[in-house]
Image (cartoon, grey):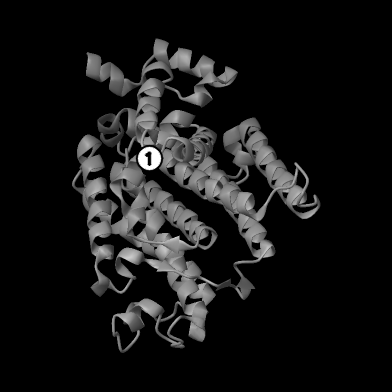
Amino acid sequence: MLQSKPWLVRPFTERSTQLFLGVLFLAMIVVSVLHLVMPEGSALYVSSYTVTLLGKYLCYALLAVAVDLVWGYLGILSLGHGAFFALGGYAMGMYLMRQIGDRGVYGDPVLPDFMVFLNWDALPWYWHGFDMAWFAFIMVLLAPGLLALVFGFLAFRSRVTGVYLSIITQALTFALMLAFFRNEMGFGGNNGLTDFKDILDFDLRTDGARLGLFIATGIALALGYVICRAIVTSKLGRVSVACRDAEARTRFIGYRVERVQLFVFTVSAMLAGVAGALYVPQVGIINPSEFSPLFSIEIVVWVALGGRATLYGAVIGAIIVNYAKTVFTGIMPDAWLFALGALFVLVTVFLPKGIAGLLPGNRKKADDDAADPPTSAKEATA
């Protein structure tokens, strides 16, 4: 019955999607009302700082959903999704830098401050067009999408899988981090891009702009979640799971596994790029540290903690870990990474399905999986 519905409508008929969207939109309404209506002295007042912080968590949640799509349903453990997130962020950062105009420290109407400081005499060719919002928004999707398409084409065509693919994805983001650290690249070097002022003619320092970005991020997370659910509940999603559990058999019965992997990997990269683009105007900076391999590993921890192959579990994991990071980096900054590593080990050992596995429906599924493991596991133990 479910498969007879159009692929984009199908997610809305699922109870889990209805519940997720309901909770998300209810949270957005509550935060907006408490921010706009309650007086600043009230205990229920949500400050602009908190609104921005929540918006950042939602960006991370969208990024985690993108990683869960390729790891949970396709079996590709990407340790380089931070690269796609950062590329989307840089595309948005370039647009925001061009909006500064002559209000920079050096007052140059064309060149960003760091280019004037480094004695650049003209705007590089790849910066042209970023003074237009529509061009920048297209590049937010196109830059990470093209990188994923080229990288995936070479990797999947060569049938690079498993731990080898994970290592290559990490090498990719590390190489990009080193490249973006160089001042000659024209992206601000170590300092990155910052001192943003306007987005779509709205002052980024105003409460209204911050609330608008929070709402836009929530809507982007909802759309990204629905697109991923539409993929995983379609025939493409079933083939993806088949590739994950028994790639050789799927290839043997006639499916072009590399095409499935390439499509899903590219869609995931584009979602990560959107998350990065929404992250930058809310935190006010983008620099090469976003390409750090450690950041990409952290994303995997979020998904593992929340629960693979559920999508909403990735959202739960991203919000919990980043909230804990906000709290504990202030209390015990030196011990936070040890706590994060211990959390990952404990979840892997005692909660292989993550927090989502504790829910009644998923607990039954976990028991069924334990009784009847995937084909790949059977083959491995045979």
In which quadrant is the N terminus drawn?
A: top right
> Does the rendering let one see residue 238?
no
Q: Is residue 199 above or below residue 227?
A: below
Number of numbered discs on residues: 1
Q: Is residue 307 above or below residue 51?
A: above
Query: Helix, strand or loop at disc 1?
Result: helix
> Does the rendering let one see residue 65?
yes
In percent of width and height, residue 162 lies at 24, 35
For label 1, the crowd category at 10 Å Cα-Cα, with few meaning under 14, some 14 to 19 and many 20 or more, is many
Say whether residue 162 is left or right of residue 107.
left
Q: Nearer the viewer, residue 88 or 325?
A: 325
Q: Which quadrant would residue 44 be assigned to in this image?
A: top right
- Going by the numbered disc 1, the residue's amino acid type is Glu
**Residue in view at x 53 percent, y 74 percent:** 133
Q: Nearer the viewer, residue 196 or 230?
A: 196
Q: Nearer the viewer, residue 234 or 95?
A: 95
**Residue in view at x 43 percent, y 35 percent:** 332
In percent of width and height, residue 264 lies at 40, 47
Q: Nearer the viewer, residue 287 or 230?
A: 287
In percent of width and height, residue 347 lies at 41, 23
Q: Which residue is mark 1?
A: 298
**Residue in view at x 45 percent, y 32 percent:** 309
Say whether residue 69 is left or right of residue 19.
left
In percent of width and height, residue 261 lies at 34, 44
